[in-house]
Image (cartoon, rainbow, N blue to C red):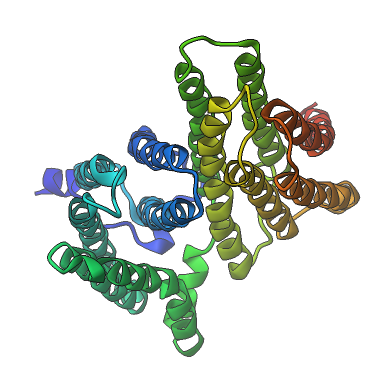
Amino acid sequence: KMKIRTWWQKPKKLKDRDIHRRVSFLELFYDLVYVVLIAEFAHSLSSHVEPVKVVEFSFMFVLVWIAWVNGTMYYELHGNIDLRTRLFTFAQMFTVVGMSVFAHNAMGEGAAGFALCFAVYQLLLTWLWWRTGIHDPDHRPLSNPYSLLFLLSAGLFAGSAFTPEAWILPMWILALFLSLITPLVLLVLGRRNPKVQEQLNLSSVLNESAIERFGLLMIIVLGEIIASVVRGISGHHHVTTSVGIAAALGMMIAVGIWWIYFDFISQQRPEPSRNASYIWLYLHLPITLGIVSTGAAIVNALAHADSELNLPGRLLLSESIGLTLISIFLLMQILHIPESYKKIYFWGKIITIFSGLVIGAIGFIHLKTILFLYAIVGVLLVPVIFGAIVWIKLSMKENFNNN
């Protein structure tokens, strides 16, 4: 019996959370399947750069991002190193692969298949979150309403697979709405229930492992830009000089965004408050959305490397990068910055949001594709250089402290 309990453990209680743990190889493997799903969404958008498709892509990306956050935070707060955790993680991965199969036409002929896979995914997570309350009475006032809302969302997705086509999108929108308001409902409950308040405070602490996990997600979506550069080059039978230059500039965009995020954001924690933790977490949604749509836009830009991008193509690229930079600026607003670095971060914020606004405006200017990409990279280099200064100063301080 002791051996069975060792390999099939109860969900970890919040108060027993390991604050010094590192991201496990199981979590890395779990995130890997999202690479495929994200790539399918990006490929679909790059093939149809038009406003309606951008809205559809954004909607589907938010759905998947919320799902990833729930799976990630469950492991972060309640996961164990046991057989039970592995099996449920693998089961979730199977459903994500299923979503990937139908992702390319998820709002068309693949809607029923995608909806059923997504519903099974949410049912698995609903079961896991509900079990946390079964084994931890203190967590029950938090887990029960959380599980109920996600059960309703899963039911809407499952039901949409058997309804007329006209009902599918409204049901999905309602399901997404229920997922999005869940944190708000819990915060309202927390005001009246001291136990919920305590559990929310425990769950909102962002340990190093959680910050590292979101950093790894950033690397995954940045990898989509690199994959997009490769796809864009592969789409040409003859690689011209213009295509080569455009591809290099696309790579520079990926490197630039990596540089800005990991110099300004990853080395600092958010302010030690529950609201700051939630804002930090949810601001990663527009950042990752912007990065993935940037990748899709680069594929389209490479297809027109020898000519001029149309307005939707230019706007998709410029507004995606602008969204990413403005979201990073907002994220910088809630970081816990040492007093000695507040001045340099202040100018970093100004430069970052200014660059985001300028890049967003460049999309309205009629330029040949190469000149358009040169202009974006030129503006992007400004926060990159400033981020390098921050990195050097922090590295010098760390080396000084170690010595």
Please report the residue visible at 48 percent of the width from the left and 84 percent of the height from the top: 188
85 to the left or right of 378? left
Residue ID at (28%, 41%): 100
> Does residue 222 appear in the picture of this structure?
no
Q: Quadrant of residue 37?
A: top left
Q: Classify 300 as above or below 96.
A: above
Q: Nearer the viewer, residue 196 or 125?
A: 125
> In the picture provided, is 6 more to the left or to the right than 392?
left
User: In this rendering, would 25 be left or right of 116?
Assistant: right
Determine whether 340 is above or below 115 in the image. above
Residue 95's spot in the image, x, y percent? 22, 46
Foreground residue, 320 or 142?
320
Q: Position of residue 297 (x, y in %)?
A: 55, 38
- In the rendered image of this protein, does residue 68 appear above or below residue 303? below
Q: Position of residue 310 (x, y in %)?
A: 61, 40
User: Which quadrant is home to the C terminus?
Assistant: top right
Residue 20 visible (yes or no): yes
Residue found at the very far bottom of the displayed protein:
192
Q: Is residue 374 left or right of residue 291?
A: right
Q: How many callouts does the rendering have?
A: 0
In front here: 199 or 234?
Answer: 234
From what the image shows, is residue 187 above or below residue 295? below
Q: Quadrant of residue 246?
A: top right
**Residue at the left extreme, as displayed:** 1
Residue 357 lies, in percent from the top left, at 77, 52
